C-alpha cells in the first residue's frame, strides 16, 4: 500500500520536541538498571553515576547513534511470502496479545492459556494482510519459561512474523535457538528474522533489566529490536501533550543509543506509539481517546524525522465489540496510517487493551482493510480517466459490461468481508444478524477449517526439546 501522508506537526515543532528530548537526556539523565549498560555509555562519553544508575547522555552521542541506525530492515515469516520490509512506503498490520480473552464459545472473560496462543496464531494465519502476531500470554505454564511455550505454540500454527514477548535474557536466548531451528540455522535466521527483541522503557526515563537483558542477548546476534515506551500523559508524563511527547521521545532515543553502542548499525524500530492518556476522573490510562491520536501522529512523524522504522499500537477503551470499539479503532487506525507509521499492532484488542476478542479481531480486520484502501487514494492517469471509453459510451449508456470495468473493478472497489451490504430483504431472510454475530460465526469457521503449513516433524521435535530443557533449567 502506498500511503498518502499527512503532517499534523510542522518540521519546526518536531525539531523543538526533539531538542527538548536531547536536553532532558543530558540534564536529567536516564536510569539503566544493568551496570553493563552504564559502562558502555560511560566509555562512549556519557556522564555516569553508578550509585544512582543514571547516565547523562550528551546530544552528540544520541545524534551519532541515529546516524548508524538503518532506515529500513527486513522481517520474515517461515515462508518467504510473509517477509516484509519495515520502514518502506507501506503499513503492516498485526494482532494484539494480552493476558485475558473473551471466550468464543461461552462469552466469559478468562485468563489466556497456551492453547489460546496456538488458536490465536492459527486464526491470524488465515487472515490476509495480517503480517505479524503478538501472542496472548500462556498463563497456565511456568512464568519463567512462558516465552518458550508461547513461541512453540505460535510457530507451530502460523508461518508469519512472530512478535514474541520476551521476559528475560535466557528466554531471548532460547527463543533465538528455537527460531534458528525453524529457519535452518543462525545465519539463515539473521537473514530472515522470524522474531525480534522488543523492549519497553518504563517512563519516565528508565530502562529495566528485562529489556536490557533481551537487547544484550539479541543485538550482538544480529536480531532486530524494538524500543518502545508506554508513558501516560498526566501521570508518568506531563499533562501537556508536547511535554509528554518530548519525554517519550527521550525514553526511546536513550534505548536506541545504547543499542547502537552495543552494535553499530543494529536494526531497531522506534515507538512512542503506545503512549496513553490519564483520565483524571477515573484514574484510568486511556487508549481510545482523541488525544491519543496526537501521540500516534507524533510517533509516525518523529520516527521518520529520525530516519527510523516506526511501530505503533492501536486499541479501544471499550470492553465489548460495540459502537465505541468501532469508532475508536477506526479513528486511531486511520490516523496511524495517514501519519506514516510502518507497523501497527492492535487487531483483536479488547477489554480496554487488557485482552483479546475473536469477534473484535474480525471487526478490526475489516476496519484495517478499509483504512488501507482509503490511504491508498485514487490513481489518476490516462487509463483511469477513461475519456475514450466515456465518449464511446455516450449519454445514457452504462459501463457495467465493458472490458475496462472487468479490468479494474477488483482494484477500484474493495469487497467487504463481514460488513453487511445486502438489501434489507436479504438481511431479513438471512436472520437479521448483526456484525458481532457474523464475526463470531466466521471466527468459529476459521478455527474449525484453517490448517496452517506444518513444520517438519524433526523441527517440531527439536523445538519441543528446547522447551523441555528450559523447563528443567528453570526448576534448578
Image (cartoon, rainbow, N blue to C red):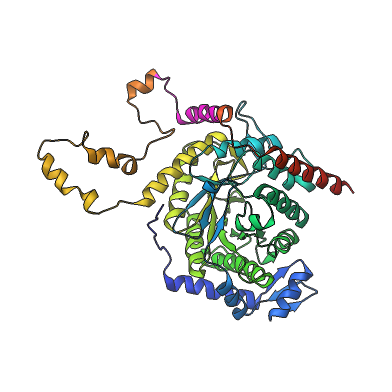
Residue 62 placement, left or right of 7: right
Residue 421 placement, left or right of 107: left
**Whole-percent x and y of residue 202?**
67, 61
The residue under the point 25% across, 39% down is 405
- Image label count: 0
- Relative height, residue 177 to residue 392 (above, below): below
Q: Which residues are magenta?
A: 430-446
- Relative height, residue 379 to residue 427 (above, below): below
Q: Nearer the viewer, residue 389 or 363?
A: 389
Q: Is residue 28 visible?
A: yes
Quadrant housing residue 392: top left
Q: Residue reaching furthest top? A: 429
Q: Main secondary structure of the magenta part?
A: helix
The residue under the point 41% across, 48% down is 372
**Whole-percent x and y of residue 331?**
44, 48
**Whole-percent x and y of residue 427?**
37, 23
Q: Nearer the viewer, residue 134 or 99?
A: 134
Q: Is residue 319 visible?
A: no
Q: Is residue 438 magenta?
A: yes
Amino acid at each position: 500500500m502506498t500511503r498518502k501522508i499527512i503532517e499534523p506537526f510542522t518540521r519546526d515543532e518536531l525539531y523543538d520536541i526533539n531538542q527538548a528530548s536531547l536536553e532532558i537526556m543530558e540534564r536529567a539523565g536516564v536510569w539503566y538498571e544493568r551496570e553493563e549498560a552504564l559502562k558502555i555509555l560511560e566509555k562512549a562519553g556519557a556522564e555516569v553515576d553508578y550509585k544512582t544508575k543514571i547516565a547523562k547522555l550528551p546530544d552528540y552521542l544520541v545524534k551519532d547513534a541515529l546516524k548508524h541506525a538503518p532506515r529500513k530492515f527486513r522481517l520474515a515469516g517461515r515462508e518467504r511470502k510473509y517477509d516484509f520490509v519495515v520502514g518502506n512506503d507501506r503499513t503492516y498490520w498485526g494482532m494484539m496479545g494480552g493476558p485475558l480473552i473473551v471466550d468464543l464459545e461461552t462469552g466469559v472473560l478468562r485468563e489466556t492459556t497456551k492453547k489460546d496462543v496456538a488458536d490465536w496464531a492459527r486464526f491470524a494465519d488465515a487472515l490476509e494482510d495480517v503480517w505479524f502476531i503478538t501472542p496472548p500470554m500462556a498463563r497456565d505454564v511456568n512464568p519463567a519459561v512462558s516465552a518458550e511455550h508461547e513461541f512453540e505454540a505460535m510457530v507451530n500454527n502460523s508461518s508469519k512474523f512472530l512478535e514474541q514477548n520476551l521476559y528475560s535474557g535466557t528466554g531471548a536466548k532460547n527463543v533465538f535457538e528455537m527460531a534458528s531451528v525453524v529457519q535452518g540455522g543462525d545465519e539463515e535466521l539473521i537473514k530472515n528474522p522470524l522474531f525480534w527483541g522488543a523492549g519497553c522503557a518504563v517512563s519516565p526515563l528508565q530502562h529495566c533489566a528485562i529489556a536490557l537483558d533481551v537487547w544484550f542477548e539479541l543485538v550482538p546476534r544480529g536480531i532486530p529490536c524494538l524500543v518502545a515506551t508506554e508513558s501516560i500523559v498526566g501521570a508518568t508524563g506531563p499533562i501537556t501533550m508536547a511535554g509528554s511527547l518530548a519525554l517519550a521521545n527521550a525514553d526511546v532515543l536513550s534505548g536506541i543509543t545504547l543499542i547502537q553502542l552495543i552494535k553499530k548499525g543494529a536494526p531497531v524500530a522506534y515507538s512512542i506509539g503506545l503512549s496513553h492518556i490519564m483520565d483524571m476522573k477515573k484514574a484510568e490510562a486511556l487508549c481510545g481517546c482523541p488525544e491519543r491520536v496526537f501521540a500516534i501522529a507524533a510517533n509516525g512523524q518523529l520516527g521518520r524525522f529520525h530516519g527510523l522504522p516506526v511501530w505503533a499500537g492501536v486499541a479501544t477503551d471499550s470492553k465489548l465489540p460495540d459502537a465505541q470499539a468501532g469508532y475508536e479503532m477506526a479513528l486511531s487506525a486511520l490516523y496511524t496510517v495517514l501519519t506514516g507509521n510502518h507497523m501497527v499492532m492492535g487487531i483483536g484488542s479488547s477489554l480496554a487493551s487488557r485482552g483479546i476478542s475473536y469477534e473484535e479481531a474480525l471487526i478490526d480486520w475489516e476496519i484495517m482493510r478499509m483504512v488501507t484502501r482509503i490511504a491508498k487514494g485514487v490513481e489518476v492517469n490516462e487509463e483511469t480517466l477513461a475519456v475514450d471509453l466515456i465518449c464511446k459510451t455516450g449519454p445514457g449508456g452504462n459501463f457495467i459490461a465493458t472490458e475496462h470495468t472487468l479490468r479494474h473493478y477488483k482494484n477500484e472497489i474493495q469487497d467487504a468481508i463481514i460488513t453487511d451490504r445486502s438489501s434489507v430483504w436479504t438481511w431479513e431472510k438471512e436472520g437479521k444478524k448483526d456484525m458481532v454475530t457474523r464475526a463470531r460465526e466466521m471466527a468459529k469457521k476459521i478455527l474449525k477449517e484453517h490448517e496452517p503449513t506444518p513444520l517438519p516433524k524433526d523441527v517440531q521435535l527439536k523445538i519441543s526439546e528446547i522447551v523441555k530443557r528450559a523447563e528443567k533449567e528453570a526448576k534448578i
